Image (cartoon, rainbow, N blue to C red):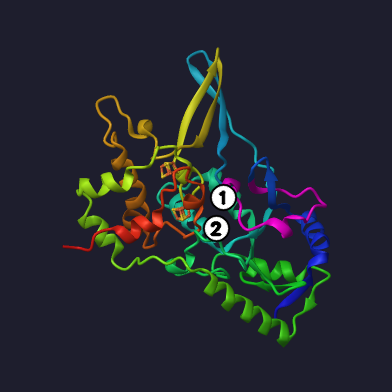
Amino acid sequence: MAEKISKKDIGKLLSQWNQEFAVFVPSKEGDATKMARWDGEDTSFLDWYRNTVIPPKASFLPSLEEMFRFQKDKGSYQLELPVSDGQKQLIFAIRPCDANAVAILDMTFKDGYEDPYYLSRRKNTLLVGLGCTNPGESCFCTSLGSDPFDSTNVDIMLSDIGDEFLIEGVTKAGKELIARTGGLEEATEADDAKAKEVKEASYRKVTRKIDTKDIGEKLSACFENEDYWEKVAAKCISCGICTLLCPTCYCFDINDELVKQEGTRIRSWDSCAFPIYTKMPMENPREKKWHRVRQKVCHKYEFYPMNFDVIACTGCGRCIRLCPVNWDIAQTIDSVPAKA
Ligand code: SF4
Ligand code: SF4
C-alpha cells in the first residue's frame, strides 16, 4: 500500500531527508531554473514548477568540472585528484522524462570505459520523481514509450492528488527510505483511485505525437539525402542550446589550464552543433550546418538505438521550447521520408 503526505508538510519531509542527503529541488537562478541545493525552508517551487530549463544531468555531469590539478616537477607531473566527500544526494521532484534521460546517460558512462566522475555521483544519488499533471505543449514523451507518471527510473514516485502527494517506493533503496521516514500516512483506496484518475488525465494531456516506427531504417535510408537535410537545417543558427540543454546529450571537451608550473584539467559541456566541434588538422567532417543537424537527429534516433537499443530522446520537449528559431525535432522526425 502506498503512503501519502499533505502538501503543507513537504518542508518537514525534505528537512528529514536533508539530514541524510544533500537535497536538491527545482530552483530559480535568474531566468533559468535548475535543480539546486535546498535552502532548508523554501517549498514555493511546488507552485511554479513544470520542469527545469537546465536538466538534472548537471547533477552528474556538471557543465564545468575540475578533473584534477597538476604540477610540473623536473620533467614529470604530480597529480592531485579531487577528493569526494561521499555525500549522498537526493533529487526531489525530478520529472519522469528526465529520470529516463539519466538512465540513458548511465549506458554511455558505463559502456567500456567507466567514467568515475559521473558514476560516483550517480551511485550516491536517489531520484524522487514527481508525475506531471500539466505537461507542456512541446512534450511528446508518450510517443517514446513513457508517460507523465512513468516510474521506471526513479527510486520513489510522488503523485499529486490534490492537497496531498501519494508516495510510492519503486526501488529497494526508495522503499527503505520511505520505511524510515516519519510523518507519512497510509493511503486509502480512494487516494489510489484519485491517483489513477490523475495519471489517466495527464496521459491524455500529452497531445503532441510522433511516429517512431522504423525511424532508424528511415534515417539510414535518407542519410545521404542532402536536399532533405539542407531543408531541415535551414533555420538553425548552430547556437548549441538544443544539445547543451538536452537531458540525454553528454558531449564534453577537456582542456588544460596552465599557469607557469601549475595547471588544472577541466571538463566542460560541448555541442555537436558547433562548427569547430569536429575540426581536425586536415579536415572537418561536419563543416556544413546540415551535417551537424543530421548528426544530432541520427545520433538520437538511429545510432544510439543501434548501440543501446533505446532512442536517446525522452520527448521532454526542451529543445523545442528553448530553440531561439523554433527548430522542432518532433516535426523533423515526422518529416523523414518513407523508405524507398
Ligand atoms: S537550439 Fe535551434 S538554432 Fe540552436 S543549434 Fe539547436 S536547432 Fe539550431
Ligand atoms: S532531443 Fe529534445 S525532446 Fe528529445 S530529450 Fe533532447 S531536449 Fe528532450
Where is residue 43, by image quadrant? bottom right
Count how many numbered circles sit on residues in the image: 2
**x 32%, y 38%: residue:** 289
Q: Are marks 1 and 2 in contact (CB under 8 Å)?
A: yes
Query: How far apart are the alpha carbons under marks 1 and 2?
Result: 7 Å
Give how far across and how far down residue 156 sits, in percent: 65, 67
* Segment colored magenta: 33-59
- Compared with residue 180, is residue 26 higher up or lower down, i.e. above or below? above
- Compared with residue 241, is residue 340 higher up or lower down, i.e. above or below? below
Where is residue 167, by image quadrant? bottom right
Give how far across and how far down residue 302 sits, in percent: 31, 56
* Side of 120 relative to 161 (left or right): left
Q: Secondary structure at mark 1?
A: loop
Residue 313 lies in the magenta-colored region = no
339 and 325: which is toward the camera: 325
**x 42%, y 56%: residue:** 312
How crowded is the residue under tag 1: few (<14 C-alpha within 10 Å), some, or many (20+)?
Answer: many
Give how far across and how far down residue 202 sits, in percent: 58, 72
Give how far across and how far down residue 41 sits, in percent: 83, 52
* Side of 259 relative to 130 (left or right): left
Q: Is mark 1 within 8 Å of ligand 2?
A: yes
Amino acid at pointer 1 = Pro
Q: Is mark 2 within 8 Å of ligand 2?
A: no
Residue indicated by mark 2: 98
Residue indicated by mark 1: 55
How crowded is the residue under tag 2: few (<14 C-alpha within 10 Å), some, or many (20+)?
Answer: many
Residue 56 lies in the magenta-colored region = yes
273 and 231: which is toward the camera: 231
Amino acid at pointer 2 = Asp
